[in-house]
Amino acid sequence: MVVSVNLPQIGILAKGDMDTFWKIFNQRMELCKGALLTRYKLLKGTPAEMSPIHWRHGAIARLGTNETIDNLLEGGYATISLGYVGVYECVQAMLGVSHTTKEGEKFALEIVQAMKDKCDEWKKETGLGFGLYGTPAESLIYRFCRLDKENYGEIENVTDRMYYTNSYHVHVSEEIDAFSKLKFESQFHAISSGGCISYIEVPNMYNNLDAVKDVIRFIYDNVQYAEINTKSDICYDCGFTGEMQINEDLDWYCPNCNNSDKNKMQVLRRTCGLTK
Ligand SMILES: [Zn+2]
């Protein structure tokens, strides 16, 4: 169960005024809490028989025929997640700088910590497993941005792109090396303990495997959860693995042996996010 808060919108509405920001922030937190509790109430009373593989036969639990899942919704067995989108744009809307600047970083950490504090407070109050979750929001980032652009117009570095930035991530347009990005984002991992992911995009690293090892070591030492995104195409003619290229006719070909027979290659591209 996740409900995600649109942080940039709070920044837009507050127009740089901190008192207004925290006032609206608190109102939105109450809304999120209500929405999450509504979901919990909707699930309460669900018979285990509703999904036997999950609840009866061990995928999640082994409940009896006439039991409901109620006990498993409580006591921290199930999570109930507060998600968030656009820390970067929120900081831009409020301070006019990126959250990777000193000033921006301080405010960004305050915002994320404030959400975590709310989750802890609700957890204590209700006994339910509230957690702060860095939402992947692969379609929500478009929806939130589109709605805000319609309502508040085009605002530089806030609504002037087609999307908001996921959770606490560094903006994709920012020049930053892999290690600095992971180090910066790792600060939020500690707070966003209900779920978080950082990732870096890399080109063909075939000839620099030491760098790949360095990145993996760095992730191990600094980051809770991260991923390296790269191309992993395969040519079945020569055995090449890496990135297939595109020629002028927009056909894929193997850079190693020039094979362009699509039946003799595998090309994978990640195109997540766009739903419309
Ligand atoms: Zn080949």
Image (cartoon, helix red, strand yellow):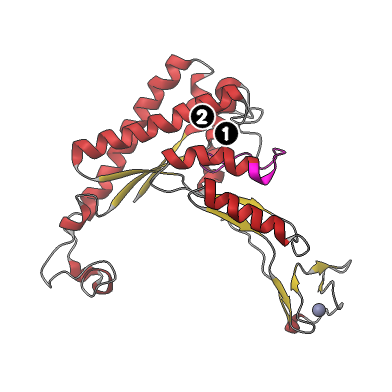
Residue 274 visible? The answer is no
Where is residue 253, by image quadrant?
Answer: bottom right
Which span of residues is magenta-colored?
A: 164-179
Where is residue 159, by image quadrant?
Answer: top right
Where is residue 73, by image quadrant?
Answer: bottom left
Which three-letter amino acid code belongs to the residue tagged 1? Answer: Tyr
Tag 2 and tag 1, C-beta contact below 8 Å: yes
Q: Assign the C terminus to one quadrant of the image.
A: bottom right
Q: Which residue was labeled with disc 2? A: 108
Q: Whereabouts is ligand 1, in terms of quadrant?
A: bottom right
Of 216 and 245, which appears nearest the observer? 216
On screen, residue 4 versus residue 238, left or right, reads left
- In this view, 61 is above or below 98: below
Measured as percent of width and height from the top left, residue 120 is found at 29, 36
| Residue depicted at 27% across the width and 54% down the height | 78
Measured as percent of width and height from the top left, residue 36 is found at 30, 43
On screen, residue 80 versus residue 228, left or right, reads left
Taking the view exactly as shown, the residue that stands out farthest to the right is: 248
